[in-house]
Image (cartoon, grey):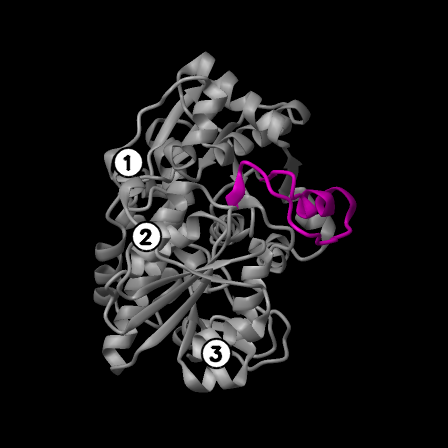
Amino acid sequence: MILYSTQQKSSDVSFEEAIFRGLPPDNGLYMPTEIQRMPAAFFEQIHTLTLPEIAEAVCQNLLGHDLSPAEIKSIITSSMTFEAPLFDLEPGVQVLELFHGPSMAFKDFGARFMAAVMSHYLQKHQREIRILVATSGDTGGAVAQGFFQTPGISVTILYPSGKVSDIQEKQLTTLGGNVQALEIDGTFDDCQRLVKQAFLDEELRGQFNLASANSINIARLIPQSFYYFAAYAALRKQGNQKPVVFSVPSGNFGNLSAGLMAYQMGLPVQAFIAACNENHPVPDYLASGIYEPSPSVETISNAMDVGSPSNFVRMQILAGAEWSKVASLVKGYATDDDKTKEVMADVFARTGYIMCPHTAVGYDGLMQYQAENSGDYVGVVLSTAHYAKFLPTVEAVLGQRVPVPQRLADLLDLQKKSVRLGTDFEGFKAYLLA
């Protein structure tokens, strides 16, 4: 895979160089120069394939020139150790459960794959690296779990103080070892800005081999495309031949961009829904053609509290670049906190199914799409995290206690270990150099 910078002011690079650089020197994002379609035979037999088999086929299509079949198989075998099942919620609505990994969030797919790929190259070249990652909630826990005790890798996670749930915070602050947590007195956008500045700082790049595990890193997007294919396979296995609409709870837009990568590889999709909370510059863009990032607003679906999505330009390119093409494929909807709570309570009352706030935003996005678009299609809502990661909110909305998986309950008794920093880059840089 050869990758170019979206700013088009830096040289093209290999897949290996892209994943370790994270960002190009010109502050763009790496994108493949070419995305080949999957062969027709793949879609003819997709309903017979397991998730790891689908992942291997997609990896071979994208990375066959970078990794051997044996290397791809080893990476997939070590990272794709959990499923992404479909839950039949109600007629015409399926929930794609992406929370069955170690940190119980969809980002386990990207973090574990990325850790396996990086470990492969680091062992091959006898190198060490330092991962910098900003999180608005679930990325931190997934990266902490995915990279914990991985030889040759140290991890520094930046998260906004007071703006992640208790369980999310414990997931990224209690491991220790090669995982360090920085509690930033600001927003996720501040955390993301600090990480981006670090990658462009010559002194830091000279001191460390820096890499990113945010969705700005192309290695995060590739494995997130796997479960879009897997959902399509599961529908076909059920005998469902209807067109598919994916509703994606969206913050930094890596997840939706991964779905668009699958679309570019030939996955039949009628539409993608960019389901956002009260941070909705992308739905506004899809409606008007004008993109205006804004400071993030705090909501109960905190992992989506992003006012300036890093992957916006990737979404544009993968959906057709021109606004008219993007808006014909991607539909944007916003849901405020009151409506999110209403959806959580209503779905539970009708079906007994418990949704986290992010999944509820995705469900409401699909409902808004259905109100505007008649036809015979199946809607797939991506459930991005287990509801228990947002326990106080969920129990307050439902008015009752809910079951908590033991591995999450155990976290609450662990001691948080973090370093508190401000939002100034010089303070962050001094911490890293020290």
Up/down of 155 relative to 48, above or below: below
In screen coordinates, is 154 left or right of 428?
A: left
Residue under the point 36% across and 66% down: 155
Residue 310 in sight here: yes
Q: Quadrant of the C terminus?
A: bottom left
Measured as percent of width and height from the top left, residue 132 is found at 44, 67
In primary-sequence order, the first of circles 2 and 1 is 2
Task: Measure how far apart labels 1 and 3 are at the Cα level.
Answer: 44 Å
Q: Which mark is residue 409?
A: 1
In primary-sequence order, the first of circles 1 and 3 is 3
Q: Quadrant of the N terminus?
A: bottom left
302 inside magenta stretch: yes
Which residue of the protein is positioned furthest toward the top in this rendering? 350
Looking at the picture, tell me which residue is in the foreground, 97 or 133: 133
Estimate how packed mark 2 is, as few (under 14), some (14 to 19) or many (20 or more) residues with alpha carbons within 10 Å. Answer: many
Up/down of 322 relative to 199, above or below: above
Q: Which residues are magenta?
A: 274-303
Whether the residues at callouts 3 and 2 have beta carbons within 8 Å, the answer is: no
Q: Amino acid at mark 1?
A: Ala
Front disc: 2 or 1: 1
For disc 3, the marked residue is 13
Front disc: 1 or 3: 1
Looking at the picture, tell me which residue is in the foreground, 128 or 368: 128
Residue under the point 45% across and 41% down: 165
SS under mark 1: helix
Residue under the point 27% across and 49% down: 52
Determine the image quadrant of residue 194.
bottom right
Measured as percent of width and height from the top left, residue 297 is found at 64, 44
In screen coordinates, is 367 left or right of 355?
A: right
